[in-house]
Amino acid sequence: MRWFNKVEQAEIWERPIEGPIGDIEAAHRIREICRAAAGSAEKVGGSADRAGSQKRISDIEKGRRESERYERAARAAMEIAMKVSDDLLRDAAVRQIVELCLAARDTKTARILFRAIQAASIKQAVLTEHPALEEQ
């Protein structure tokens, strides 16, 4: 019975990075992390809509796991983004992390990351899609 002996695979953000990586590889890794965590982020964002409804213990536990998964992925992506030396690549990577945060309805983190984007074209593209990020 293979079901019971199933070994959990490590998430992409939990895999060790072999040696130094370049900016392009770091940007690819951030994109992969954001794609892998998108489902968790959407579930976390969707559970915010149902905050007042009755939930079973199993649903609460699943929500907690999804939230932790999203947070670990976002944290790992941010750590990699801080090491990217090319400004434009870093801004593009940060934009992907902002999108991940917005999917989870983590607007506080998304606003902080949005302010870190320096490229005017990327900043304007994010504002066009998400006008709520504009400073108030």
Image (cartoon, grey):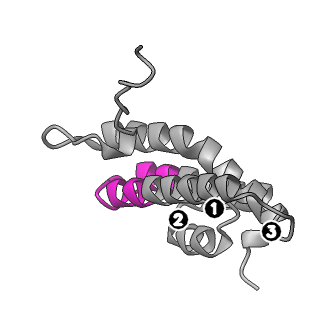
The residue at the far bottom in this view is 136
Q: Name the residue under label 1.
A: 123
Magenta: main secondary structure equals helix
Q: In which quarter of the image is residue 9?
A: top left
Residue 132 sits inside the magenta stretch? no
The residue at the far top in this view is 1
Q: Measuring from the top left, give residue 66's x and y in whole percent.
A: 57, 52
The residue lying at 41 percent from left, 13 percent from top is 1
Q: Distance between the residues labelled 3 and 1?
A: 32 Å
Q: Measuring from the top left, give residue 127's x and y in whole percent.
A: 74, 62
Q: Nearer the viewer, residue 131 or 61?
A: 61
Q: In which quarter of the image is residue 108?
A: bottom right
The residue lying at 48 percent from left, 57 percent from top is 74
Q: Mark 2 points at which residue?
A: 117
Q: Residue 103 carries which label?
A: none
- For the record, the magenta segment spans 75-94
